[in-house]
Amino acid sequence: MSALSQTPAWIDFVKAAQSSPITSDALRIVHAADIDVDLSTQRHSKALAKASDALLAQQGFEAARKELFEGGHINWTENRAAWHTALRATHPPASVSDAIQTEQARLVSFVEQANAQNRYSNVVHLGIGGSDWGPRLAMTALKAGNGRRTIRFASNVDAHAITSALEGLDPHDTLIIISSKSFTTIESLANAACAIDWLRAGGIEEPLERFVAVTANPGAAREFGIQDAHIFEFWDWVGGRYSIWSSIGLPIALGLGQEAFNEMLAGAQAMDEHFLTAPVEQNAPVQMALSSVVNCSILGYASFALCPYDARLYNLVPWLQQLEMESLGKSTTRDGDTLDVPSSPAVWGMPGTDGQHTFFQWLHQDGKGAPVDFILCAKPDHRHTRHHRLLVANCLAQRAALLQGKSYEQALAEVQKTEPDSARASKLARHRVHPGGRPSTLIVLPSLNPRQLGSLLALYEHKVFVEGVIWGLNPFDQWGVEYGKRLAGDIERRLDALGSDPDVSPYDPSTAHWVRALASN
Ligand code: F6P
């Protein structure tokens, strides 16, 4: 297939997008699995909708979606399926249903037994990336005081993380979960070694008896010394950043209860149903992906901000950073060509209203700014009515201000109220102009519960998948993370080298300088 920018459907898509203003006078809300996705402040027009249909057809969207749900080897560089939808299906596909249901039953029975025996008041979860962000996000979003246990997370190899995670816990009442799809990730293994020492120092003679492993490499977990009954398996056809729906969800079941985890699965399944059956125009993941492609590939926004107006969703930002950027941060298409349009927006952000005091100045008055995904819960899980009213008001106000902006004339009228000198007033007014016309999406959840969180995560998973289809990128591999890991191993060996003058010849002068300078620490 020729380069995307030269394809007929793309050329028409660009033309239609460029002549579709942000419709500030039309309401466009898509309803998906109890969630309202308001795309009114994204570019849209009948022409763009038509061009979008043609582009999706040209890029093989329907066939790709079918492959995704039927376990086709859609992860073409690793020749694997990407079957996270099977993990949450009401009736998993026959070829994998036994494996899925066996592991789900093992997980349920482990949690039930731990609850019945009132064991493990504390859980320390060791994992990183996709083996961490999902459970960490769920626990910080949903715990709200109804957690059965203290669940702590350590991911970073910086030992400050593991030491603070273990601090103050009773080794006799603590379970260590090591979650690692490969069971070779150096951070998780180094933290596990630290936890073993901590258990031993606390008087536990058989520390590994208090370990559980969640992995797609049970052999390595067995070799590590973890008993089979404590090894929960998932499979290579589950991508790391898509694995929360597998036994990677164990901390959620231990911390919030099996029912909460089941509700997350049900919420994700409801979003799968929507993604599979909703017509394109009413399909939330598809419409969010199309807006993202317009904003990134055509309007030149190289990033977007994620601003959940709910303090409990602060881990949604790093979770989505990995999902979007590790899935789409590539430039080689399925045909082996270099993608010739801008793609893969960087994701950043933080919960509102904190963001308003951090980077909203930039969003409003930078020469370009960035699109924003706003997320709101209609109902809070507290009784502070005025706080929630203020939260909602700020979220809607920021979004409206980004859209409508403020003209010079409006700014001048404002300044003249307090500045009698007209020359000075007109100068000052220039500093108060807001360009406006800045795109955003507003996602409204009825409330933040396990089901809604499951639907929200699946919404973004499918949005990323559709972006990948349009750009021709594989959202399910991550070859780009291997090189740095390999160099890290090499440099660590040199740092470890006897004497303080390790051979650093292969490296640039700066790296060489610091390897020498820091070798002795
Ligand atoms: O970031 C690279 C990566 O391989 C992610 O894709 C993955 O989620 C993370 O590291 C952890 O890998 P594992 O689950 O194998 O420890």
Image: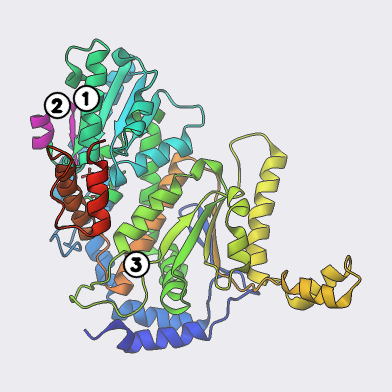
Q: Nearer the viewer, residue 163 or 219?
A: 163
Q: Is residue 459 left or right of residue 392?
A: left
Res. 83 visible in picture: no
Please tell me in which quadrant of the rendered image residue 102 appears.
Answer: top left
Residue type at tag 3: Val
Q: Residue at x 41, y 56 (%)?
A: 459
Residue type at tag 1: Phe
Q: Is residue 387 left or right of residue 263?
A: right
Indicate yes or no whether the magenta region holds residue 228: yes
Tell me the element at label 2.
loop
First in residue order: circle 1 vs circle 3: 1
Q: Are marks 2 and 1 in contact (CB under 8 Å)?
A: yes
Q: Residue at x 27, y 48 (%)?
A: 514
Circle 1 is placed at which residue position?
A: 211
Query: In whole angstroms, how far apart are the C-alphas of marks 3 and 2?
Result: 39 Å
Point out residue 336 in the picture as x, y percentages from the top left corner.
18, 75
- The label shown at residue 226 is 2
What is the magenta range? 219-235
Point out residue 178 in the picture as x, y percentages from the top left corner.
24, 33
